[in-house]
Amino acid sequence: MSRPADVTPAALLALALDLTTDLGPTLIQGRRAATRNVDTKSSKTDMVTEMDRWCEGEVVSRLLDARPDDGILGEEGASVDGTSGVRWIIDPIDGTTNYFYDLPGYSISIAAEIDGVISAGLVIDPIRAETFTATKGGGATRNGRPLSVSKVDDLSIALVGTGFNYQPDVRRDQAETLVHLLPIVRDIRRFGGAALDLCAVACGRLDIYFERGLSAWDVAAGGLIATEAGALLTDFSGQPSWTDQAVCGPPALHAALLAHLGSGWRA
């Protein structure tokens, strides 16, 4: 099917940037009021605030005003079947726990698929005032400057990022993995949201990252940014993955970490 001329990764990214310029400052300004009334979702530790819902509503409304035939998939329940071949994947606040506690490590994550292929990605870090972007085949940037992954190729000196699931039994398994992994890497970091972890790989703040139990909205934008910066992104068996499991890092480290995650540990 042929697409209109404006359905290009660059055009979709430009639209997302234009529609979200005010959202980061608004999240910061509204945090105190928004966190007075908090609900939970999959477990009592999986929080959602009024600002999560407000931000998703704003993004969806603005995108559909501009492109009414597009599809939508949002973490907080937004779901629209589009007819244009474009679908937006939205996490209005990735890292809600950090947001609730007024910690850095949360972001707004927006990706655009064209015919099922992640083609544009935008991650906004309100605290650092950083905007990460990528288009498929067009590279990745932070505040307009090109990004590239770490050059570290020895797992023993690699700084490794990860995250934890909201389900207690999965957390227990993840802790067991860390017991095995900590002695053979430089150190482990757990910042908050997967989107910024993936962006940290893209700019070399983390050497490599892995996590289990992710959803499409956690990975889509940050995953594109990381891969366009030179990272590999797979599941724990080495197959391409944009949901549930993620191992993301430069090729040499990726192979090394994958070998350990695939050696029988409960990752």
Image (tube, rainbow, N blue to C red):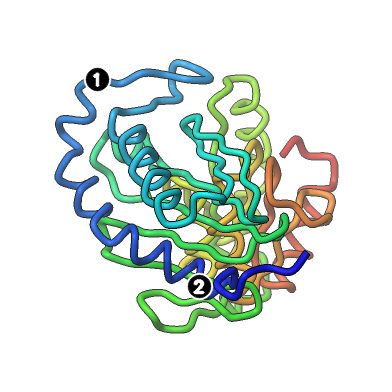
Instruction: Find numbered disc 2 in the image and state the secondary structure of the residue it sits on.
Output: helix
> What residue is drawn where x is 40% and y is 51%?
65
Point out residue 189 in the picture as x, y percentages from the top left corner: 48, 51
**Number of the label disc, if any, that sits on residue 50:** none
Mark 1 lies on residue:
37
Instruction: Find numbered disc 1 in the image and state the secondary structure of the residue it sits on.
Output: loop
Nearest the viewer among 250 and 49 is 49
* 76 is higher (above) or lower (below) than 217: above
How packed mark 1 is, by other alpha carbons closer than 10 Å (few <14, some 14-19, many 20 or more), is few
Point out residue 1 in the picture as x, y percentages from the top left corner: 78, 64
> Exactly how many numbered labels are in the figure?
2
> What residue is drawn where x is 54% and y is 59%?
222
Disc 2 marks which amino acid? Answer: Ala
Disc 1 marks which amino acid? Answer: Asn
* 51 is higher (above) or lower (below) than 141: above
> What residue is drawn where x is 38% and y is 66%?
17
Nearest the viewer among 145 and 111 is 111
The tag earlier along the polypeptide, 2 or 1, is 2
Closer mark to the observer between disc 2 and disc 1: 2
Nearest the viewer among 159 and 82 is 82
* 202 is higher (above) or lower (below) than 31: below
**Number of the label disc, if any, that sits on residue 11:** 2
